[in-house]
Amino acid sequence: MSQTSNRIFDEMARLMNDAAGVAQGVRREFDTLFRSQAERILRELDVVPREEFEAVKAMAALARDENEALKVRIEALEGKAAGKAKKAGPAVE
């Protein structure tokens, strides 16, 4: 009787071990499927990768700085032109 019960327990342990292996395989398959579906959805949404976003953000900041510098330069040139126009007086026709 004891040898029969040991064999039953051995078979049950082997069955449980096989079931655990199958469960791990199913989990890996699910993870792979979920990851591929998530990547497909993100591609369809045209989500920008982080690196590209940071590069464009830096370019925009640089363009803003350049625009501010040009604005100051234009205002200075307009000031000079207005000052010269006042010195010359009204135009005679």
Image (spheres, helix red, strand yellow):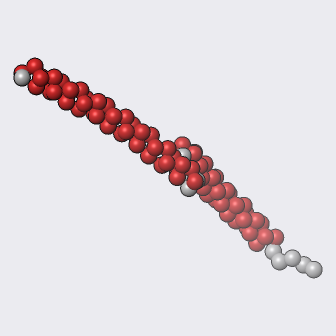
Please state which of residues 35 and 61 is positioned toward the viewer in this rendering: 35
Please state which of residues 34 and 3 is positioned toward the viewer in this rendering: 3
- x, y (%) of residue 31? 40, 41
Residue at the top extreme, as displayed: 3
**Quarter of the figure with the N terminus:** top left
Question: Is residue 70 positioned above or below 55 on the image?
Answer: below
User: Does 66 sit left or right of 2 as displayed?
Assistant: right
Question: What residue appears at the point 56 percent right and 56 percent down from the top-left corner?
Answer: 45
Q: How many marks?
A: 0
Residue at the right extreme, as displayed: 93
**Quarter of the figure with the C terminus:** bottom right
User: Does 8 sit left or right of 65 as displayed?
Assistant: left
Residue at the left extreme, as displayed: 1
User: Does 91 sit left or right of 50 as displayed?
Assistant: right
Is residue 87 at least partly visible in the picture? no
Please state which of residues 79 and 92 is positioned toward the viewer in this rendering: 79
Question: Is residue 83 positioned above or below 61 on the image?
Answer: below
Question: What residue appears at the point 76 percent right and 72 percent down from the top-left corner?
Answer: 86
Question: What residue appears at the point 37 percent right and 34 percent down from the top-left corner?
Answer: 25
- x, y (%) of residue 88? 82, 70
Is residue 10 at least partly visible in the picture? yes
Q: Quadrant of residue 77?
A: bottom right
